[in-house]
Image (tube, rainbow, N blue to C red):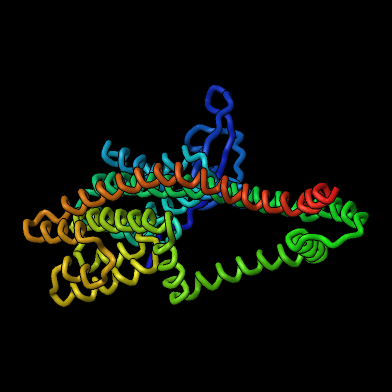
Amino acid sequence: MATNPKKNLQTFLWTGLDSRKRKVNGEQDAPNAAFLKSLLRRQGITDARVRKKPKASTFFSKRITGKSIALVTRQIATLISAGIPIAQSIAAVSRSSENPRLGEVLSNIRRDVEGGTAFSVAIRKYPAYFDRLYVNLVAVGEESGTLDHLMLKIASYLERVEEIKGKIRSAMFYPIMVLSVAVIIVAIMLIFVIPEFEKLFSSFGAGLPTLTQSMIDVSHWFQEWWYIFFFGVIVFAMITRATYKRSPRMQHLLDRMVLRAPIFGPVLRKAVIARYARTLATMFGAGVPLVEGLAAVAGATGNRVYYDACYRIRREVSTGRPLETSMAQTRLFPPMVLQMVATGEETGELESMLHKTADYFESEVNDAVDAMSSLIEPIMIVILGGIVGTIVVAMYLPIFKMAEAF
């Protein structure tokens, strides 16, 4: 059985002289350098020098974000809708990419497509960037001949999801920064400030208040064991993260705790429901069967509690139960969502109702994040002020008592 030579193509950079002896250069795929030189001679290029295109260093390159995938998806869809073949569209987007890592991924996909591999099969090799939802929708587009239309849908979906993620990240950034500053300030006071006060107190020759003595004891411990403290925190975080990735039970436990957390929990729950509704609407609107679509929706929720719930819903739906009834049994969806789904099933407008549900909850997330941001700021100030204030009071308490004695 003959092999397809396109599967063994490599990318070369070449320079040479044209028929007018002007220097020209370019980039070309070929099986090997000798073949490319022969090809260039036939095109009238003389004194050709050919070298392999170096692979971009991915260690220091920017990571591939959801926004990057959404952008290249929209660009490829636009080129396809203009009548440009899929391989050429991917090549054009690959060359224009500012992210070397993403450009390399797209180049590999383009080679596979030129070798006769379906686009959906080619992107399946990169599940970290193209999830099950993406692959399924592209496969549907290839089968139905509406790849450009569905890729525009994917791009719009990814943009909406990234917008919600960005809102939540921005809300989380402020408290994390404040707590980090608080840890640094407390560490500086324990290591450098409190020891100076201790020297002063030792000249008093009197007992210290309980709060002051406690702070001095903590300072002693921290000065001696600070490296163990920080190393322990880092090791604990790494072990927790590794266990979380490998243990579905721990994922379920921690994700449920996050959903029940004050302030952040309700916002995250709304964000997950919005993503669930938007993803299911996109899959259903593309013609993907509901049972198959729910498997992709599970991975898109980003929360293990709802991930497990999606598979329970999928099992129920596969036995012929209505989607609304199956969702109600999980007790994870508010009545409004269940009513919208029930109405959509009864009227045959499930896609429209799910999109409206997603719009509503995305709006709720935006409003909740804005409100949460204004609420978090004074809370963080109180926490930081309380920590620093306690240390300051503990250090000045002996001085106040001595002043009262005199």
Q: How many marks?
A: 0
- Asked whether residue 3 appears in the rendered view, the answer is no
Q: Nearer the viewer, residue 34 or 70?
A: 70
Residue shown at 36% from the left, 64% from the top: 299
Residue 326 image position (x, y, % from top left): 20, 71
Nearer to us in this view, 287 or 199: 199
Image coords of residue 195 (percent x, y): 85, 55
Most extreme residue toward the left, as rendered? 347
Question: Within the image, what quadrant is residue 76 found in?
Answer: top left
User: 383 left or right of 65?
Assistant: right
Residue 50 in the image: above or below residue 287: above
Image side of residue 386 versus residue 245, left or right: right
Could you say which is closer to the camera, residue 371 or residue 134?
371
Residue 261 visible? The answer is: yes
Quadrant of the frame with the N terminus: bottom left
Is residue 253 placed above or below 104 in the rendered structure? below
Residue 51 percent across, percent down from the top left: 61, 44
Tell me what residue is drawn at x 32 percent, y 38 percent: 79
Please name whichever residue, 150 or 168, is drawn nearer the observer in this view of the structure.
Answer: 168
**Residue 368 horizontal side relative to residue 41, left or right:** left
Q: Residue at the spot x=42%, y=43% of the render? A: 91
Location of residue 3 in the rendering, given as x and y in whole percent from the top left corner: 41, 63
Left or right, 59 with respect to 211, comes to left
Q: Residue placed at 72% from the left, 65% from the top? A: 229
